[in-house]
């Protein structure tokens, strides 16, 4: 499968400069982020993708929209298991009732309205979510045809690599999970 980190968000823009949490809840993409999402869509056009799994954060959903269109309206499944580690203000999400109004074509019915954790998620929590997702994907015969639009921390837990906005990595869920992860941003 292909793991793709969401495009640049308002949080990323400010945090990169200051290294401080700017306090932006569920940030949207910046103008650069929207361009990155469209460019990412162009890069993925030649891939054999049958499904997109996306985190319910706005930045991930905004990244997924042009990619799904470019790939011929591939089905998009929203799944909070691939969300970011809850550690900053940007990791407070939007209620599913609001998300459903913004993306009426997507199904949010299977997700609790308040779907993000109530307190900081330990690194072990992200690793456990990644292990569960790895097992679920490995059970699918067509896992290699999946694009997952996710976040820095979740992709780190899946691959052991720290990647930047709109970078992508191939991931074989049948292989062992990475060990000895460094969670420092």
Image (cartoon, rainbow, N blue to C red):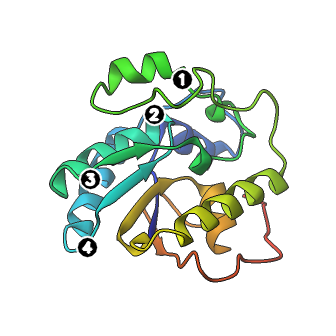
Measured from the top left, where is residue 107 in percent x and y? 38, 32
Q: CA distance from mark 4 to mark 2?
A: 24 Å
Q: CA distance from mark 2 to mark 3?
A: 15 Å
Q: Is residue 97 visible?
A: yes
Tell me the residue at 61%/47% (across/down): 81
Sequence-wise first label, 1 or 3: 3
Sequence-wise first label, 1 or 2: 2
Measured from the top left, where is residue 147 in percent x and y? 39, 62
Secondary structure type for disc 3: helix
Q: Is residue 174 above or below residue 137?
A: below
| 104 displayed left or right of 85 | left
Tell me the residue at 62%/43% (across/down): 15
Sequence-wise first label, 2 or 3: 2
Secondary structure type for disc 2: helix
**C-beta proximity under 8 Å, tags 1 and 2:** yes
Sequence-wise first label, 4 or 2: 4
Front one among 74 and 151: 74
**C-beta proximity under 8 Å, tags 4 and 3:** no
Specify the quadrant that holds the C terminus. Answer: bottom right
Residue 47, labelled with which disc? 4
Front one among 169 and 132: 132
Front one among 87 and 119: 119
Residue 67, labelled with which disc? 3
- Give the labeled residue for mark 1: 94
Front one among 140 and 97: 140
Instruction: Tell me the crowding category of disc 1: few under 14, some 14 to 19, or many 20 or more residues within 10 angstroms, Cα based.
Output: some
- Give the labeled residue for mark 2: 58
């Amino acid at each position: 499968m292909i793991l793709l980190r969401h495009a640049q968000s308002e949080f990323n823009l400010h945090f990169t400069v200051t290294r401080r949490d700017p306090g932006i809840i569920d940030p949207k993409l910046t103008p650069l982020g929207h361009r990155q999402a469209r460019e990412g869509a162009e890069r993925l056009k030649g891939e054999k993708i049958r499904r997109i799994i996306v985190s319910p954060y706005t930045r991930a959903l905004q990244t997924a929209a042009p990619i799904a269109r470019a790939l011929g309206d591939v089905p998009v499944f929203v799944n909070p298991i691939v969300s970011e580690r809850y550690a900053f203000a940007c990791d407070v999400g939007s209620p599913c009732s609001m998300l459903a109004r913004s993306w009426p074509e997507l199904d949010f019915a299977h997700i609790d309205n308040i779907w993000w954790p109530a307190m900081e998620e330990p690194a072990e929590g992200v690793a456990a979510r990644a292990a569960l997702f790895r097992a679920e994907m490995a059970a699918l015969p067509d896992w290699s045809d999946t694009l997952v639009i996710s976040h820095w921390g979740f992709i780190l837990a899946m691959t052991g690599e720290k990647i930047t906005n709109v970078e992508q990595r191939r991931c074989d869920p049948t292989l062992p999970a990475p060990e000895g992860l460094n969670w420092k941003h």
